[in-house]
Amino acid sequence: MKFKKLFGASIVLLLVASQIQVSARDWYVSAARGKGKSGKKSKPAKDLGNIVSKLKPGDVVHIAAGTYPGRGKSGADIIKVPVSIIGGYSDDFSSRDPWGKYKTIFSGDNKTKNYKVSPRVSIDLSKYRTKIITPILIDGLIVDQGAQNHYKTVKQLKIVRLASPKTGANPTPDRGGIFVRVSRSPDFKTPWNITVKNNLVLNSAPTQGALAVFGYAKSRILIENNLVINCTGTGIYAGTSWAGRNEALAPKFTIKNNSILFIWKYDAFVSSFSGVGFKTDSEVVADFANNIIAFSDRFNIQKQGKWPLNLKNNILIGAVDSTYYETVGDSKIQFDDLEDEAEYLSDDSGDNKNSKITIPISKEWLTLYGSRVLIDRNAVEADIKPQKTRANMLRSILGLNQRADDIKADSPIWLPRISVDDALKAVASPLANDCGASSSLIK
């Protein structure tokens, strides 16, 4: 009887596996020649948003070069099943070069009538209940939210958070560029496998992660070779939907060879929850290696919780407040004291550097960045001049002239738009040794 039961269970598992293979399919999307919803290579769809409702677990979506505003120019693609999304193809899908010849750009339209409060690209499985578990992959997308932002003037030098009924402008989106969230796996046993690699996120203005992944117990998450540049909130957020006390069950993140550059505060006044290069949730275990974090308005790294963070061979420079912040104990730690004073780094942490790097983007954009006013709200309210030394510290690292500011209550520059081509200069080749994102690492 026991043999029969085991044999029957094996048959069921084989049938389930067979069903996954049969049901999963490849979809093709091309802005240039797309039409309809068949999504075949010979007749691709025009936008990912047009076929989202048709996707099944395990499907793979291949997206050619072009600009994609979403269905109805909504600027939000919300996927509710585990799939793979791969961009950077030629229009016939015969070759791939996502940061070169074949850029797959996810954008939007600030004045769309179909405005959605959602991340630009999201795979959200918080309500997923189908018992089919397949890997999740986002690879080779360029998420540029510049066209979705509400700017004060046509020069696009400063974002405006609120809508404008007079002009018809929508609010600047505050939900980020790439978002993945999973919950308990439907069979209660199989962990999720999530990979986010070879993506570029720019001009994103969230409160939290410009690129954010929330795992669950035993999830394995790889975040590799991404560039996050000119965003508010947090550059890369390693989060969890799971709460527990057993470190062995925590979602495990491997975060390597990413570049996180110019992470702004939410606005000129806000001094909390934003301007952080990399942040972890409390119930997360993470290896963070060979990354570059440069120019964060608060901290390069914000470590929440007590489980150790393995911090190895990273370049950490240009944080306005402090290099590293542990929320447990409220400890702000500068780079020179990192390995001595950080309580919750792993014993293997080391070889991190504070060395100066040259970021090969345009002098025009760097000058705009250096022209912003860094405001200490408490100083303003106390009628004391703002943090001149910190602003000039950043200018000095960037090779810009020093400047003496008078007290101001606002900044004329805040998240000025950077172009895709300019941003890609930062990953054309490695910025320093084997650290950071690079087109040479795309696989």
Image: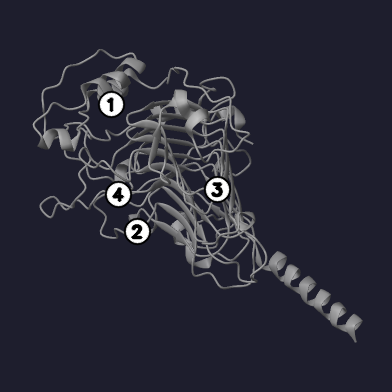
Contact between marks 2 and 3 (CB within 8 A): the answer is no
Residue lying farthest bottom?
1
Is residue 315 depicted above or below 46 in this figure? above
Label 3 crowd (10 A; few <14 / some 14-19 / many >=20): many
Which mark is in front, 2 or 3?
3
| Nearer to me, 278 or 160 | 278
The residue to which callout 3 is attached is 307
Is residue 439 depicted above or below 12 in this figure? above
Visible residue check, residue 398:
no
Q: Residue at x 63, y 56 (%)?
A: 135
The residue to which callout 1 is attached is 369
Is residue 43 depicted above or below 255 in this figure? below
Contact between marks 2 and 1 (CB within 8 A): the answer is no
Q: Amino acid at mark 2?
A: Gly
Which mark is in front, 2 or 1?
1
Q: Quadrant of the C terminus?
A: top right
Q: Amino acid at mark 4?
A: Asp
SS for dot 2: helix
Q: Residue at x 81, y 78 (%)?
A: 9
* Cα distance between the residues tagged 3 and 1: 36 Å
Q: Amino acid at mark 3?
A: Trp
Q: Is residue 144 left or right of residue 244?
A: left
Q: Residue at x 21, y 47 (%)?
A: 161
* Cα distance between the residues tagged 4 and 3: 41 Å
Q: Amino acid at mark 1?
A: Tyr
Residue 420's quadrant in the figure?
top left
The answer to which of marks 4 and 3 sits earlier in the sequence is: 4
The residue to which callout 2 is attached is 72
Contact between marks 4 and 3 (CB within 8 A): the answer is no
